[in-house]
Image (cartoon, helix red, strand yellow):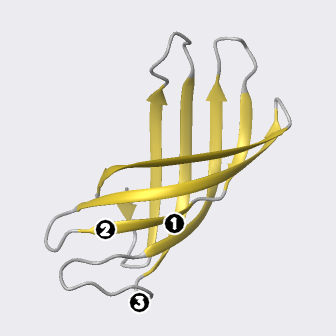
Amino acid sequence: MFLLDVTHAFDDAILRRLSSKDDWYIWADYLYHFRSLITVEQGELPVYLGIGGRLKLQESNEDKFGIRFPVGLAYEFAGVPVDVFLEVVPIWDVALSYDFDLEGGFGVRFYF
């Protein structure tokens, strides 16, 4: 994740699906962090909202491009450029195929 300041960030990823299919996901999101909603003793626990795009390249040639709307919660460790996050992401596919997806995830992000 690339931090513009304490409130604004860009998050992007490229990943390959870990199954028998050769599917690839590429996305980039703008994230806005609400830092004062939840307070913790150490670190920070911001809620974030965002908007972005996703390209889903599928082995079955049913490729999709969609608009992402990530909503999440991230624990940011004090003094370390790392967070642990949990998010839900509605996606509206608007090109190559028309569909609505609801994805989610959890993981670790490094800040730049």
**Amino acid type, callout 1:** Leu
Q: How many marks?
A: 3
- Kindly state the secondary structure of the residue where label 1 is placed: strand
Instruction: Report the residue marked by disc 1.
Output: 31
Residue at the far right: name it.
Answer: 98
Residue identifier under label 2: 75
Three-letter code, disc 3: Ser
Under circle 2, the secondary element is strand
Percent of width and height locating residue 33: 46, 76
Task: Tell me what residue is drawn at x 82 percent, y 36 percent.
Answer: 95
Among the two numbered marks 2 and 1 on one chain, the one whose residue lies closer to the N terminus: 1
Q: Position of residue 85 (x, y in %)?
A: 38, 58
Q: Which picture quadrant has residue 59?
A: top right
Q: Which numbered circle lies on residue 96?
A: none
Count neighbours of disc 1 (C-alpha within 10 A) and say few if under 14, some if 14 to 19, many if 20 or more: many
Residue 72 lies, in percent from the top left, at 50, 64
CA separation in Å, label 2 and label 1: 15 Å
**Position of residue 88 measured from the top left corner of the image (x, y, whole percent):** 57, 56
Q: Which residue position holds label 3? A: 36
Which mark lies nearer to you, 2 or 1? 2
Density class for disc 2 (Cα within 10 Å; few <14, some 14-19, many ≥20) is some
Distance (Cα) linking label 3 and label 2? 13 Å
